[in-house]
Image (cartoon, helix red, strand yellow):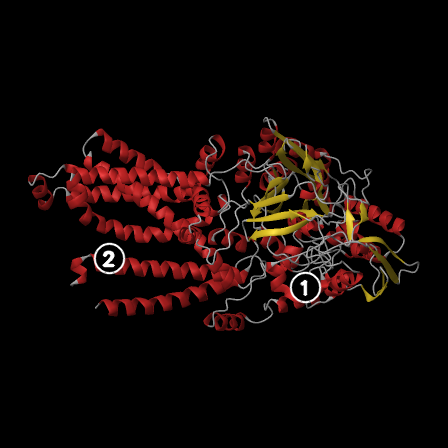
């Protein structure tokens, strides 16, 4: 049953990615802004313009361009960036670890913060504390991530400069890692200087991304916890002498977490999408920052590569969430 | 159970303390140490080949290229030209040959000797259409080089009066022949070397470049041993970086922030006019074919008011596409602010505030300081005299596309840079119809500007451009607005030399 589900989902993933590839390819070409027009010298003649178009393959028909590009993609060749003059696959995969680490840290922060607030809210249900936490969650949710970023920059970057404002790591540190997963590889290699510097640079952007998600998690999880706390099994736990906190943590949380997991899965993809603006603000060299530069410069091969990778990420994450949900939910697992 | 809970708490507190300590090790350190300098730069290096691709013609990237590479000819802060890797240069009398003397005693960053062959190879490569040098049309005008000692001679295929100014401009960098042929273009991107004052020590694409002073630099080693250039594209983040002391120098922030920052202890600033102008292209279509409308639109704009109110006084009002310091600047050409004259001109064509002339003006929003706001103000001024303009906002990429296909709206805001100050690269290419960058395409201008592109008599050429500028102002073919001012903020422990070209060169920075 599970294998069949995985097979069907993988098949739909491939179809989805192909659809995305077609749409992106067409959209970036019909969208306003021509990369050749952006690099024309003042004295360029029609012949020069035609030559430049030929150099970048824009002299061919849209269908021909797509077939050439798709043929390359199937062989792992996503083309060469017009502005960065390097293979797109190399560039995109080089930046992916930064965005994945940022998103993962943001997710962990959101889970920790949202979880704590939900548990406290459930524990203090019906009191002024719960109302206060609800109001705070609402306020946090209403502020977009980039605005949190600006607030953090002002507070922890300027007024009380304890965190790094821009970049991913201190430029003075020499890094000769095999991968671009600075935290992961830094821990494996015992390079705590790299890990510390990366975390110091990552904390503000990660918090900016995490806060709205944390507020969402807090609200949903608290609601589910409150419902669970009215169930018989939690009443039984109380009768057995468990404290209210223990009832929440040991009995209610397990069941209440399931709907939250589904939300987290969906929101994680949005969180990765949110890195585009936040990475720009913090000059964090991830995929999002690269995507903005690619769009500004109309670097068509790079835009295509980034969008396709984002699409692949989204579908894979959704697949994993669905599978984990199926696996964790006994009714679905045995259904 | 109690013991377990206590242990967990202890563990939690311990883990938190460890994490805090770990993050603290990475806490920001104030930028300035004795021999190092940190700059927050507004655009990342896209490629390390300064002669090919779009990056090569991006004016904002030239500062970083100039730290690593040298041009054939050097340019001083005031736009004047001086010896670079060439110490002497010139045409022969009949302009059929060029002679260039190559500087001796220059080293590449890898220790190799710099030779005349490097110059010849760089020029030949730049002229090769397959290489993708965006300025190939200039470099292809010379060739057939021969070397004797440290003197290079070459043939002139097509006379270009500004050839030697181009040698201090975009893509005019000398690259190492032997090394480049050895490592190839990909290898060069990964480990670029030049003859410039700094060597690339570490580079993280999109994040930073760390430069080390080149002890053997022919112009003397620069003052700071290490320069870190962080690419911080967001202006608010650059402001925060300089304010927090994380960086020593930054530029291109909003003028409000500039004024606020330089008032703070420990920070200084300089704001100088640069070779970048804000202008409104007029297209030879629709109502713009009416000279009265064009001139009325120009006379109705109070440029100084815009500079004072929107740009806090940072700007220089202009009447032509030549600015003070350019070879063909003529301060006697003035298109004065005169709204009453605008009304009369419009009335002569049957327009009034009750029956306004209508057209679209295109502009970017946020691409240049207060671009959209400036156009809003201009549209407001126009409305008072009988011009009803509708604003259309587009991205700069769209502007390039429309301009290249000659499909811009009747009016379109743009900024034009010209760091060599030659009239051919300002009035010339922006107003000469066949150029893909020109918008006004009338034959009278083609007739007037065309011969100037090949005029061998320099005095006659410059005077020709002055005459063209006057003619353009009288006909109202374009609306120059202002010369931009670039704000630079720096720690008071650093001296910064501003360049009129807009360059921000680390080698020109010294300890205060």
Image coordinates for residue B117, horizontal then vertical, percent? 78, 63
Chain holding disc 2: A
Label annotation for residue A325: 2
Near-viewer residue (B163 or A30): B163
Residue located 91% across and 59% down the image: B92
Chain of residue at mark 1: B
Compared with residue A324, is residue B276 higher up or lower down, i.e. above or below? Answer: above
Residue farthest along the right direction in this orientation: B93
Determine the secondary structure under disc 1. helix
Residue B139 position within the rendered picture, expressed as x and y whole percent measured from the top left: 76, 61
Q: Is residue B4 left or right of residue B177?
A: left
Report whether B378 appears left or right of A303: right
- Which quadrant is home to the N terminus of chain A? bottom left
Q: Nearer the viewer, residue A97 or B398?
A: A97
Vertical side of B356 occupied by A73: above or below? below
Q: CA distance from mark 1 to mark 2?
A: 55 Å
Numbered disc 2: secondary structure = helix
- Residue at image mark 1: B180
Q: Nearer the viewer, residue A316 or B294?
A: A316
- Residue at screen point 22% across, 51% down: A258
Query: Residue A234's spot in the image, x, y percent?
Result: 11, 43
- Report whether residue B410 is seen: no
User: Of the numbered discs in the image, which one, if any, rests on residue B139?
Assistant: none
In the image, residue B208 above or below residue B304: below
Q: Position of residue B220 (x, y in %)?
A: 75, 45
Let me know if residue B212 appears in the view. yes
**Callouts 1 and 2 on one subunit:** no
* Residue at the image position 42 percent from the left and 40 percent from the top: B23
Taking the spot 13% from the left edge, 37% from the top edge, the residue there is: A243
Question: In the rendered view of the protein, which quadrant contains the C terminus of chain A?
Answer: bottom left
């Amino acid at each position: 049953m599970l294998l069949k589900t995985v097979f069907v989902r993988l098949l739909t993933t491939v179809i989805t990615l192909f659809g995305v590839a077609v749409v992106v390819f067409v959209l970036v070409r019909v969208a306003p802004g021509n990369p050749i027009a952006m690099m024309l010298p003042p004295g360029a003649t029609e012949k020069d313009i035609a030559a430049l178009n030929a150099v970048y393959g824009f002299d061919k028909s849209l269908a021909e361009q797509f077939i050439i590009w798709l043929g390359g993609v199937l062989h792992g060749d996503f083309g060469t960036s017009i502005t960065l003059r390097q293979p797109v696959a190399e560039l995109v995969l080089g930046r992916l670890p930064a965005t994945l680490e940022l998103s993962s840290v943001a997710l962990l922060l959101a889970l920790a913060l949202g979880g704590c607030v939900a548990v406290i809210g459930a524990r203090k249900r019906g009191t002024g504390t719960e109302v206060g936490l609800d109001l705070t969650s609402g306020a946090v949710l209403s502020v977009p991530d980039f605005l949190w970023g600006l607030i953090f920059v002002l507070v922890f970057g300027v007024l009380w400069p304890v965190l790094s404002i821009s970049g991913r790591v201190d430029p003075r540190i020499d890094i000769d890692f095999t991968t671009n997963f600075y935290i992961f590889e830094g821990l494996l290699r015992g390079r705590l200087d790299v890990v510390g510097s990366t975390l110091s640079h990552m904390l503000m952007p990660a918090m900016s991304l995490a806060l709205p998600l944390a507020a969402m998690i807090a609200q949903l999880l608290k609601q589910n916890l409150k419902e669970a706390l009215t169930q018989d099994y939690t009443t039984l736990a109380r009768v057995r002498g468990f404290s209210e906190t223990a009832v929440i943590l040991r009995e209610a949380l397990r069941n209440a977490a399931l709907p939250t997991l589904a939300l987290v899965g969906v929101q994680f993809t949005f969180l990765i999408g949110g890195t585009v603006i936040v990475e720009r603000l913090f000059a964090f060299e991830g995929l999002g920052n690269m995507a903005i530069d690619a769009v500004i410069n109309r670097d068509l091969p790079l835009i295509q590569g980034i969008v396709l990778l984002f699409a692949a990420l989204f579908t894979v994450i959704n697949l994993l969430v669905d599978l984990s949900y199926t696996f964790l939910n006994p009714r679905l697992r045995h259904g | 159970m109690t013991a377990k809970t206590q242990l967990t708490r202890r563990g939690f507190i311990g883990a938190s303390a460890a994490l805090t300590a770990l993050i603290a090790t990475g806490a920001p350190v104030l930028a300035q140490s004795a021999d190092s300098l940190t700059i927050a730069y507004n655009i990342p290096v896209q490629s390390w080949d300064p002669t090919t691709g779009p990056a090569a013609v991006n004016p904002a990237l030239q500062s970083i290229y100039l730290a690593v590479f040298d041009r054939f000819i050097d340019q001083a802060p005031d736009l004047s030209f001086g010896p670079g890797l060439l110490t002497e240069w010139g045409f022969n009398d009949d302009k059929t040959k060029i002679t260039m003397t190559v500087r001796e005693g220059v080293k590449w960053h890898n220790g190799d000797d710099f030779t005349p062959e490097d110059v010849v190879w760089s020029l030949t490569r730049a002229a090769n259409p397959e290489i993708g040098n965006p300025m190939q049309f200039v470099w292809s005008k010379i060739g057939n080089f021969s070397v004797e000692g440290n003197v290079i001679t070459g043939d002139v295929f097509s006379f270009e009066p500004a050839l030697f100014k181009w040698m201090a401009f975009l893509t005019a960098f000398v690259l190492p022949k032997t090394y480049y042929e050895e490592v190839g273009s990909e290898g060069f991107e990964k480990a670029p070397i030049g003859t410039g004052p700094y060597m690339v020590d570490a580079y993280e694409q999109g994040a930073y470049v760390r430069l080390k002073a080149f002890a053997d630099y022919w112009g003397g080693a620069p003052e700071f041993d290490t320069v870190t250039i962080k690419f911080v594209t967001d202006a608010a983040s650059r402001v925060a970086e300089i304010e927090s002391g994380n960086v020593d120098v930054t530029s291109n922030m909003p003028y409000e922030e500039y004024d606020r920052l330089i008032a703070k202890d420990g920070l200084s600033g300089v704001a100088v006019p640069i070779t970048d102008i804000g202008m409104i292209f007029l297209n030879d279509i629709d109502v713009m074919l009416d000279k009265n409308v064009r001139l009325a639109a120009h006379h109705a704009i109070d440029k100084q008011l815009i500079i004072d109110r929107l740009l806090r006084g940072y700007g220089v009002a202009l009447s032509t596409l030549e600015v003070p310091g350019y070879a063909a600047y003529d301060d006697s050409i003035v298109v004065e602010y005169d709204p009453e004259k605008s009304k009369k001109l419009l009335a002569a064509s049957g327009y009034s505030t009750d029956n306004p002339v209508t057209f679209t003006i295109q502009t970017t929003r946020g691409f240049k300081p207060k671009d959209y706001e400036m156009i809003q103000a201009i549209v407001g001024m126009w409305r008072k005299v009988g011009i009803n303009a509708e604003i259309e906002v587009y991205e700069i990429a769209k502007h390039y596309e429309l301009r290249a296909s000659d499909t811009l709206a009747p009016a379109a805001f743009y900024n034009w840079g010209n760091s060599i100050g030659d009239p051919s690269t300002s009035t010339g290419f922006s107003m000469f119809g066949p150029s893909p960058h020109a918008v006004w395409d009338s034959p009278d201008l083609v007739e007037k500007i065309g011969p100037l592109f090949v005029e061998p008599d320099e005095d006659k050429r410059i005077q020709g451009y002055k005459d063209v500028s006057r003619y353009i102002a009288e006909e109202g073919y374009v609306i120059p607005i202002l010369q931009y001012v670039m704000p630079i903020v720096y720690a008071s422990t650093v001296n910064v030399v501003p360049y009129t070209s807009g360059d921000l060169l680390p080698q020109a920075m010294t300890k205060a």
